[in-house]
Amino acid sequence: MFFSLPNQLRIRSAHLRVDPNYLSTLTGALNQSSSMINNLTSELSSGLSVQSLQDNPVAVAQSTLLASQIDQTDTFVQSASGEASMMQVADSTLGDVVAQVTQALSLAVEGSNGTQNAADNASVAQSLSGILSEVVSLANTSYQGQYLFSGSQGSVQPFTLNTTATPPTATYAGDTNVQFIEVPGGQKLQINLPGSSVFGSGATGIVGALSQLIGDISGGASTATITTDTAALNTALGQLSDQRSTLDSSLSRLNSATTFAQTTESQLEVAQGGLVSANPEIVATQLSSAETQHQALLSVISNLGNQEDLFQLMR
């Protein structure tokens, strides 16, 4: 913005007298110039073109709405990141369980070949007991102080192994609650696997099948019985794999939703910045022009005391 300098001089006799209205105009122009310099300096230092609601009520309202959306999206991203880490640990744990059960199936085949004596059976049963203990230990895996397979009771250790029983048995102390996370689009994704649905309890699932197999091999059961136990353990392993697939599917979709949310958040931040951010190059140019004009006004005012110079300036 540039200010015109009014040429309002009254000439009496051989002297010049500045019109008071002209002085008032100069004073107003100088004040306006100072205000403009202050505003542009503030914009340049803060990087914001909107300093208050009065500057641009519409932009401020839109910026506030975008800020709320950014906060909501960021909250989801942070929450999803923690849940995804937990789910990755759970998936890795289940991978270790699969390896243990696969080894148990090999031992079961060895124990059902019909050539085992009592000592051989005792050795196989001992190895299977070690696998059961390892499976229970994996089922009790925790992440950041919360057990992964306790349902909704993260502070409760899910499994207890009774090694004094013959065969040893594992019991479940968690609940069967399935937990979900809601992605920005409204879809709910499962984020946990209750231990009873993955490992079983007592005589069910993997822990039940292992206990039965240990008892029958150590007791010298028939080949047909061991074969039936092996089939039951293999079925239990299939059930665990199905549960793991559910978790992996949710994890994949959660990662995709998180990536989309992060992209959306970046776009919202750009949109918000466009509403209230100042262009440094443009503001710097405007500030330089305003300062030049301000100095010109000061020069005019300082020359008012020299009428001859003022007359030459106003010609």
Image (cartoon, rainbow, N blue to C red):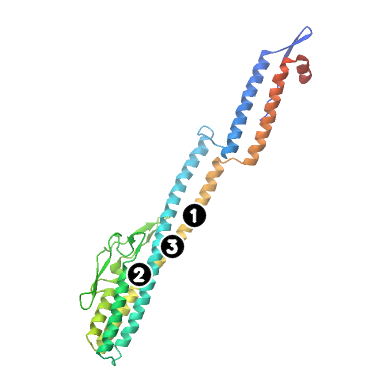
Image coords of residue 293 (percent x, y): 69, 28
Question: What residue lies at 23% left-to-right and 81% top-to-bottom?
Answer: 215
- Identified by mark 1, the residue type is Gln
Query: Which one is in front, 284 or 214?
Result: 214
Q: Residues within 10 Å of mark 1 (few under 14, many from 20)?
A: some
Quadrant of the frame with the C terminus: top right
Question: What is the tally of numbered marks visible in this picture?
Answer: 3
Q: Quadrant of residue 146?
A: bottom left
89 versus 14 height, above or below: below
Image coords of residue 302 (percent x, y): 71, 19
Residue annotated with mark 3: 253
81 versus 287 height, above or below: below
* Residue at the far left in the pictured view: 165
Q: Quadrant of residue 298?
A: top right
Q: Secondary structure at mark 1?
A: helix
The residues tagged by marks 1 and 3 sit, at their Cα atoms, a distance apart of 14 Å
Q: Residues within 10 Å of mark 2 (few under 14, many from 20)?
A: some
Residue annotated with mark 1: 262
Q: Are marks 1 and 3 in contact (CB under 8 Å)?
A: no
Residue annotated with mark 2: 243
Q: Tell me which numbered mark, 1 or 2, is placed earlier along the sequence.
A: 2
